[in-house]
Image: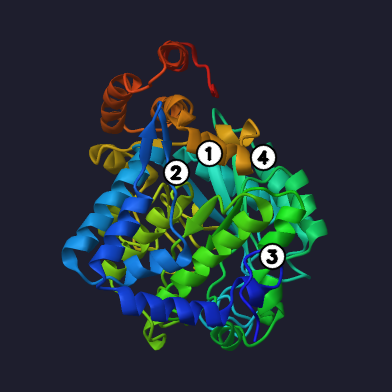
């Protein structure tokens, strides 16, 4: 039996099955323990002192008690606390991005993904560099500045050299006022050496979803291919960090295994990164399994309701207050709206989940990785966010100023984010409005910028931001950043 040790570099010791089972037993025993729940909510509450905000977060065991709690008024308190924490560290900014699928060639046999090697009727496609340029121009014409590139695992069709060439191509496309300023990468687990190459290529965050932390289920869900190796996959973030990548993104695919197990495993992984590398995950994603080409989500009997899904998001926000949280267009407009309040800080907009999808007039379905629920244009999503009181942010400044890893976390923890991210969000929104927005969205956006400039705490920063906004509007200047 592997002993639980968050500092271990062995997957079965930092994600200990026995520790998760113990945690779930403890949570079940205490789910109606009002005194303990009150104590945990109090512990997690933000502390405001000397202009700084700090939060202690919760351990996987403590957060599991909140997730198990069934007392309606306590759940309501959790939502309120999650909202307060989200506001304290991320304000009303929502970062925008889009996925870009490079290739759906894949040698793995993952039973929940239509890209699995045995699927003979999906159209296999790999973008050429010229096709990538066209996709990037289509994304720039919408107004996107941040991409997450995706590719199946296939050493012959998608070797690291191909991925690196794609990144270089993406950064090299300058179209009108369009530039992709940050490329996040979601590719299969690889070696320290290859992570080093990705770091040198200037990637933003390295994202890898665990899919499930339950080892036995993991091996059954990945029956063939290199992804079958649970330890190699689970230990990937340590190799990425050893390779110099300091922003990593975790996630599980909710619906494959029991959600309480996944929740505990996810937080244990975050604790492990903090214990070993001194900084937790930059982001946590919360995808749910969805219908796709030959995949029927109803065959996985661990699907979760919208209510449970919202509770998971709130509890993650309370447990890891400084971590960015991502929700994709897998989810509907209604679900995304609720999730924004209680923890989500990044969303995709106008996503196409097929290879080469952005240059197609009609949304192609023959090579989609999953069905897209929220099919609105980027302009519609931006307008909707502003109607809800959120600032759509196209900012990539922290990554480009070297504020990554622990430097980003210390900025977040010090409360200085309001003097930095808030004006950056407004300036990048102003760029979007000038270059891409519809007249109606423009009107809304400029009114919002005017109002939100007044919420920048530091006077000097506010003055500079106002000058930059004038420069963006009247003098065609772009890419200011604090």
The percent position of residue 247, horizontal first and vertical second, equals 62, 48
Q: Secondary structure at mark 3?
A: helix
- Asked which secondary structure carries label 1, the reply is loop
The picture quadrant where one finds residue 375 is: bottom left
Q: Which numbered mark, 2 or 4, is in the foreground of this view?
A: 2
Q: Is residue 288 above or below residue 129?
A: below
**Residue mark closest to the camera, 3 vs 4:** 3
**Alpha carbons under labels 3 and 1: distance apart:** 27 Å
Whichever of labels 3 and 1 marks the residue nearer the N terminus, that label is 1
Q: Please give the name of the residue rendered at 24% of the width and 41% of the height, measured from the top-left corner.
A: 388
Residue identified by numbered label 1: 145
- Give the camera-side residue of 180 and 187: 187
Neighbour tally class for label 1: few under 14, some 14-19, many 20 plus, Cα within 10 Å? many
Please, is residue 352 above or below residue 170 in the view? below
What percent of the width, then of the height, locates residue 243? 77, 53
**Circle 1/circle 2 CB separation < 8 Å:** yes
Q: Label 3, on which residue?
A: 236
148, 114: nearer the viewer: 148
Q: On the image, numbered disc 2 is attached to which residue?
A: 96
Q: What distance separates the C-alpha of mark 2 from that of mark 3?
A: 26 Å
- Residue 334 is drawn in which quadrant? bottom left
Lower position in the chain sequence, tag 2 or tag 4:
2
Of discs 2 and 3, which sits in the foreground?
A: 3
Image coords of residue 218 (percent x, y): 57, 82
Between the residue at mark 1 and the residue at mark 2, the CA separation in whole angstroms equals: 8 Å
Q: CA distance from mark 3 to mark 4?
A: 25 Å
Q: Secondary structure at mark 4?
A: helix
């Amino acid at each position: 039996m592997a002993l639980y040790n968050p500092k271990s570099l062995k997957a079965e010791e930092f994600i200990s099955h026995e520790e998760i089972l113990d945690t779930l037993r403890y949570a079940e025993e205490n789910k109606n323990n009002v005194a303990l729940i009150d104590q945990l909510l109090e512990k997690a509450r933000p502390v405001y002192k000397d202009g700084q905000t700090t939060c202690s977060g919760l351990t996987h065991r403590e957060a599991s008690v909140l997730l198990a709690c069934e007392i309606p008024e306590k759940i309501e308190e959790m939502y309120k606390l999650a909202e307060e924490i989200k506001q304290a560290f991320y304000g009303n900014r929502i970062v925008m991005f889009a996925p870009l699928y490079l290739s759906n060639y894949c040698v793995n046999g993952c039973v929940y993904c239509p890209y699995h090697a045995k699927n003979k009727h999906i159209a296999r496609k790999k973008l050429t560099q010229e096709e990538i340029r066209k996709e990037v121009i289509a994304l720039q014409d919408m107004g996107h500045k941040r991409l997450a590139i995706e590719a199946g695992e296939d050493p012959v069709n998608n070797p690291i050299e191909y991925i690196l060439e794609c990144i270089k191509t993406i950064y090299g496309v300058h179209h009108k006022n369009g530039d992709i300023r940050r490329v996040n990468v979601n590719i299969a687990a690889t070696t320290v050496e290859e992570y080093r190459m990705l770091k040198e290529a200037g990637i933003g965050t390295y994202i890898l979803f665990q899919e499930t932390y339950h080892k036995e289920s993991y091996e059954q869900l990945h029956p063939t291919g290199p992804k079958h190796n649970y330890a190699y996959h689970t230990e990937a973030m340590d190799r990425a960090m050893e390779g110099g990548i300091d922003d990593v993104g975790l996630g599980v695919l909710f619906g494959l295994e029991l959600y309480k197990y996944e929740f505990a495993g996810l937080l244990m992984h975050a604790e492990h990164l903090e214990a070993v590398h001194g900084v937790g995950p930059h982001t946590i994603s919360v995808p749910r399994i969805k219908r796709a080409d030959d995949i029927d989500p109803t065959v996985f009997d661990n699907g979760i309701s919208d209510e449970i899904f919202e509770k998971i998001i709130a509890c993650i926000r309370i447990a890891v207050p400084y971590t960015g949280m991502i929700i994709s267009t897998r989810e509907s407009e209604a679900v995304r709206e609720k999730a924004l309040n209680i923890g989500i800080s990044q969303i995709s907009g106008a996503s196409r989940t097929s290879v080469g999808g952005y240059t197609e007039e009609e949304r192609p379905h023959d090579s989609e990785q999953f069905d897209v629920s929220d099919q609105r244009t980027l302009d519609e999503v931006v307008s909707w966010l502003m109607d809800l009181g959120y600032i759509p942010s196209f900012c990539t400044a922290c990554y480009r100023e070297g504020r990554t890893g622990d430097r980003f976390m210390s900025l977040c923890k010090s409360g200085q984010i309001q003097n930095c991210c808030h004006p950056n969000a407004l300036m990048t929104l102003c760029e979007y409005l000038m270059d891409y927005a519809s007249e109606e969205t423009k009107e809304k956006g400029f009114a919002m910028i005017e109002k939100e400039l007044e919420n920048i705490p530091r006077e000097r920063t506010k003055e500079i931001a106002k000058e930059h906004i004038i420069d963006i509007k009247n003098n065609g200047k772009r890419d200011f950043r604090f």
